[in-house]
Amino acid sequence: MLDKRLMKIAELVSGKGAAADVGTDHAYLAAELITSGKCRRVIASDVKEGPLDSARATVEKYGIQDKVELVLSDGLEKVDLNGVTDVVIAGMGGETIADIIGRCVSNLDGVRMILQPMTKAELLRKKLYEYQFEITGEYTAEDKDKLYVIMVAEKAPDGKLLTENDALYGFFDDDEAARKYRKREAERLAKVGKSLEAAGKAEEAQHYAALAYKMENGTDSVKINSIYACLDSIYPFSAQDSWDNSGLLVENYDMECSKVLLTLDITNEAVNEASEKGAELIISHHPVIFEPLKRIRRNTPVFTLIDRGIAAICMHTNLDICDGGTNGVILDRLSERFELSGEAEPFEELGDGRHYGWIVQLAQPEVPSVFAAALRDIFGCEYVRVSSSAERVSRIAFCSGSGGSMLGIAEAKGCDALITGDVKHDVWIAANNSGTALFDCGHFHTENIVLTKLRSVLENKFPQLDIEIAESSSDPCEYV
């Protein structure tokens, strides 16, 4: 009666109590569980009357009307879970299954979930851990040329989160079916990477190539000193400003890692995220230790890093100064969006070939309001503050972070616009008096965009590393 997919699901039902089959369709699973003697009672639900009519016909065919309860329900909303030990949700998209669980998550303590997503298994895995479930088993069922993923999940007392790679890799035993599944996934990811490469999206292409590598080969640990040396070869720590404190600021227990979290700032939230995702190293832009510490308080990121054995590499001004760093990413983004004339020029020159920011010339002048709208898209910020007196922009200086004090340098170099963040009141007044277009895109947004570049650099060198851009790396301000 059942295909291989449903047979595997039936095998995984514990039989310790009643089972609920959500989205039952023809109630074939319910009939199998009852007629085999595995369950004494099954609740079979569906969101539409049509499938329930088909289910009713199956139940009547096998004479099990007294053991199968048919329920019209959107997901689990009208399913009475009293006495239910197993909930099966199969044959739906991963997003739909995650939504069904998310709406009833508080009622699922002690319930064994058996889930079979038709699409987006990685999204479902990630959501399950956000809902504080743990995948205790994962299996494949092969039927003809199709491979079906089946997960068993139960509520977990300890909080854990999945990285993107974790969510893709899954929790299968290392058997032939799992290897076949991962090989197919690797081919799919590699194909996405090739498409992105053809579209000129090199960083995203590199990321998918690295995901494909890990899907076939798994992750492996790397010495943190090797990661430091790689970064130092591209963004030399010796190039940092004299007042800065970039470098390996916190060591971990064994100075190796297999998971890395990238973030703009090492906040308490970032350390918690690293801990929950199992990252042994955080790489940030802003130094977690800047001024000399005379005391390490318990509620600080430094204390928590040490307590949880997480290392920290911080790349501040060396990343801002070096080609291909923070300002190099902004240059690339502007070049993708606008036609530029001539070569970019150094903005604030520091000597020894070092400089903050660049100056570019637009091939066609832009109205400040139109240019500001483009910057909002480039940086992903909620709004851009713009000075009020300029009429056109063409020669533009930019510096990531807090560069409002560089307005005079921009004007001295013949620029009619400056892009930066954290602009103070007096600088706005000066810009309006001089007619210079000033664009404040926010300190966070003008720097956070470098994280995808850092990930690409590291994945190119270490494809075996699981490198995650922190979900907690977000604008520290809210706008009301």
Image (tube, rainbow, N blue to C red):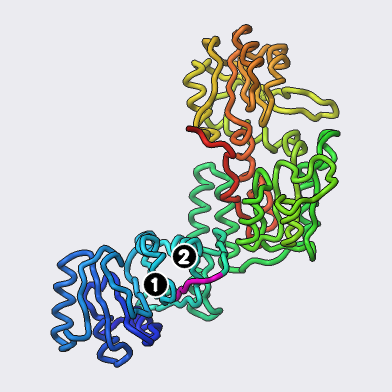
Q: Residue at x 50, y 72 (%)?
A: 135
Q: Is residue 211 left or right of residue 398?
A: left
Based on the picture, tell me whether residue 153 belongs to the magenta stretch: yes
For residue 236, say whether it is visible. Answer: no
Whether residue 283 sits left or right of residue 251 in the image: it is left
Q: Is residue 88 left or right of residue 202?
A: left
* Among the two numbered marks 1 and 2 on one chain, the one whose residue lies closer to the N terminus: 1
> What percent of the width, then of the height, locates residue 191?
49, 56
What is the x, y in percent for residue 186? Answer: 52, 64
Relative placement, left or right, of 456 versus 236 is left
Between 52 and 301, the one lying in front of the other is 301
Instruction: Tell me if label 1 and label 2 are in contact, CB under 8 Å.
Output: yes
Q: Amino acid at mark 1?
A: Leu
Q: Which one is nearer the viewer's eye here, 329 or 260?
A: 260
Identify the image quadrant of residue 147.
bottom left
The N terminus: image quadrant: bottom left
The magenta stretch is 152-157
| Mark linked to residue 319 | none
Q: Residue at x 66, y 46 (%)?
A: 454
The residue lying at 86 percent from left, 34 percent from top is: 242
User: Circle 1 sits in a helix, a strand or a loop, which is it?
Assistant: strand
How many angstroms separate mark 1 from mark 2 (CA)? 11 Å
Label 1, residues with CA under 10 Å away: few <14, some 14-19, many ≥20: many
Depth order, front residue of 76/391: 76
- What residue is disc 1 on? 115
Number of the label disc, if any, that sits on residue 128: 2
Up/down of 227 relative to 146, above or below: above
Q: With respect to residue 113, does 467 lie above or below? A: above
How would you classify the magenta stretch by its main secondary structure? strand
Where is residue 282 drawn, in percent x and y? 70, 53
Disc 2 secondary structure class: helix
Q: Identify which amino acid the numbered label 2 is placed on.
A: Leu
